[in-house]
Amino acid sequence: MGGRQKQAPTPGPASSSIPVPEDAVRQLIEAQRAEAELSVIAAQLRGIPELKREPDAPISDYVDGLLKRRAELLKGRKATAMLKREVRPRPLDSLVLSVAAHFGPWTTVWMPYFGPGWERTPRTAGTSGRISREDFDPKESFGFPGSIRYSFLATDSGEVDPHKPKYWVTASAASINLPEAPFDGELYFRFRVCGLTDFWRVDDYSGYYSQFVWIGGTPDIVTDNPFLVTAEVVGLNPLQVDLGPLSGTSNQSVSGLPSVWGSLPVMKGKTPALAFQYGVSLGVASGTVQGSGAFYTVLEGASPEPAPQDQGKIEYKFEPDWWIKAIQDRVKAAL
């Protein structure tokens, strides 16, 4: 995506002030639970010897049930999509960004501090525990804005549906208002999210763990809440772990550092905003999972062990419609 020219970040990270609508929270929870269940079903199907040897072999009622449930979840994924208007990176975006990097710097801005967020625990008999957000010590490295630290302890006794994971989901939200758009065009943004998790104890029949990142955006904060407009960006989930193979182990560490970037249409004189929800989905069936984890936001190009000056910030830049169209026309002419 081109070389990184940085301007000094605007001073003073702040807490998010844009409210997160309850509908947005509910739909995000449903989406994360569905994604987790889809991942568990996929792992179960991959583990069936008959399907490995002969994908078209006659299937049992058990396998048939898994396939039908997968179809239901895939259908539900479309039905519950949290989209007022799509905001997505187009195939041209990566080219625009690589060219534009030579004609002007990215602007670096502080991420806000994440708010307290929300939490959902299973109501099934025999379940206990939670995912607990931890307060930050500003003197510690994880005290940067755009960072979250948490611990988790979740238990399912297996009293109800012993082979079916029950889900704990939590997320924290933040948002940022960017400067007024200087012209009609696109707002591009980029950053990386480092996800870290230490599993102290994994002792379950099956399970699933995911760190997820959700990004929303609006070209005009006056007319739209950015938490109601899903931004389909490149990157996102730092970690997705099938806990089944880890059962019976302790002190296991995993990490991820995906690049996240996308674009948002903007209008001259209007104030765009980005919304962020970083969260955790943990599924446990008949057992206990315990550990701790963290997210932190860093600049694109930062190393897996980022320097302090690269933490807690994102980059953005505005590009005019005429510039994007000129690049698009040159690409068409070259084909």
Image (spheres, helix red, strand yellow):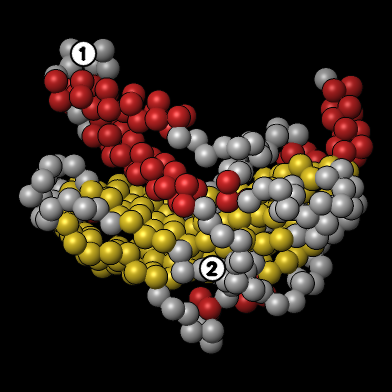
Nearer to the camera, 309 or 10:
10
Residue 97 in sight from this viewpoint: no
Left or right, 61 with respect to 101, comes to left
Q: Secondary structure at mark 2?
A: loop
**Residue picked out by circle 2:** 114
Q: Residue at x 83, y 45 (%)?
A: 267
Q: Picture coordinates of residue 181 (x, y %)?
A: 84, 52
Disc assigned to residue 178:
none
Q: Residue at x 22, y 46 (%)?
A: 165
**Residue picked out by circle 1:** 57
- The alpha-carbon separation of the residues under discs 1 and 2 comes to 50 Å
Name the quarter where the C terminus is drawn.
top right
- 179 versus 49 height, above or below: below
Q: Secondary structure at mark 1?
A: loop
Q: Picture coordinates of residue 88 (x, y %)?
A: 65, 38
Type of residue at label 2?
A: Phe
Q: Residue at x 61, y 44 (%)?
A: 229
Q: Which of marks 2 and 1 precedes in the sequence?
A: 1
- 224 versus 44 height, above or below: below
Whether residues under marks 1 and 2 lie with C-beta atoms below 8 angstroms apart, the answer is: no
Q: Picture coordinates of residue 225 (x, y %)?
A: 63, 51
Residue 29 in sight from this viewpoint: yes
Type of residue at label 1?
A: Ala
Outermost residue, left direction?
159
Q: Nearer the viewer, mark 1 or mark 2?
A: 2
Badge 1 density bin: few <14, some 14–19, many ≥20, Cα 10 Å: few
- The image quadrant that residue 263 belongs to is top right
- The image quadrant that residue 282 belongs to is bottom left
Q: Residue at x 10, y 46 (%)?
A: 160
